[in-house]
Image: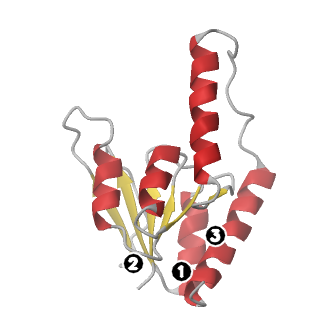
């Protein structure tokens, strides 16, 4: 059964994921490094991953459990890449869908931006998260769910 995994520590669209998942009757697992409140629903689960000192512990937990056709919501491009390798779907909270065709460019851009930040050429971060991002995310999540259900 289609399952949504949320990389939850700083995800700004958790409530949107819950609404869409409820509409489609899907299970959601929010994976985080620390406890926080999630709705008290049988189909929503919070998984607190105890940190062992490795920053990728939560990512590893998701990758070990995700299956083909499942969806991961994360800003972490490397996690998205790892999930795509398992034939899962991936999108970020701003509605950017990662595909096998687009992930290479996303990884390269990530590396370039890290190098530019390290060199001091870029000092700012991304634009503030806004209504258009939230709307785009909802649209893309709905599209992905329907695509998986149609077997595409």
Q: Which residue is mark 3?
A: 141
Q: Is residue 41 visible?
A: yes
Name which of mark 3 and mark 1 comes first in the sequence.
1
Label 3 packing within 10 angstroms: few (<14), some (14-19), many (20+): many
Residue 50 left/right relative to 22: left
Q: How is the image coloured?
A: secondary structure
CA–CA distance in space, label 1 to label 2: 8 Å
- Of all residues, the one furthest to the top in this rendering is 120
Q: Is residue 91 above or below residue 76?
A: below
Label annotation for residue 43: 2
Which residue is at a point 37% across and 73% down the rendered structure image?
67
Q: Nearer the viewer, mark 3 or mark 2?
A: 3
Which quadrant of the structure image shows residue 38? Answer: bottom left
Q: Which residue is mark 1?
A: 22
CA–CA distance in space, label 3 to label 1: 13 Å
- Image coords of residue 42 (percent x, y): 35, 79
Determine the secondary structure under disc 3: helix
Q: Quadrant of the C terminus?
A: bottom right
- Image coords of residue 43 (percent x, y): 39, 78
Name which of mark 3 and mark 2 comes first in the sequence.
2
Q: Nearer the viewer, mark 3 or mark 1?
A: 3
* Residue nearest the viewer, comparing 133 with 54: 54
Q: Are marks 1 and 2 in contact (CB under 8 Å)?
A: yes
Q: Quadrant of the N terminus?
A: bottom left
Name which of mark 1 and mark 2 comes first in the sequence.
1
Label annotation for residue 112: none
Q: Is residue 66 above or below residue 34?
A: below
- Image coords of residue 46 (percent x, y): 34, 61
Which residue is at a point 21% across and 44% down the rendered structure image?
50
């Amino acid at each position: 059964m289609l399952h949504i995994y949320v990389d939850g520590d700083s995800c700004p669209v958790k409530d949107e994921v819950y609404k869409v998942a409820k509409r489609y009757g899907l299970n959601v697992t929010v994976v985080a490094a620390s406890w926080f409140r999630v709705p008290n629903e049988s189909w929503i689960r919070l998984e607190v991953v105890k940190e062992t000192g490795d920053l990728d512990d939560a990512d590893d937990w998701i990758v070990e459990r995700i299956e083909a056709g499942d969806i991961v919501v994360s800003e972490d491009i490397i996690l998205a890449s790892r999930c795509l390798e398992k034939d899962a779907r991936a999108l970020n909270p701003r509605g950017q869908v990662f595909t096998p065709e687009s992930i290479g460019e996303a990884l390269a851009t990530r590396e370039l931006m890290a190098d530019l930040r390290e060199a001091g050429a870029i000092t700012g971060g991304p634009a503030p998260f806004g209504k258009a991002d939230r709307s785009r995310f909802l649209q893309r999540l709905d599209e992905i769910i329907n695509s998986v259900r149609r077997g595409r």
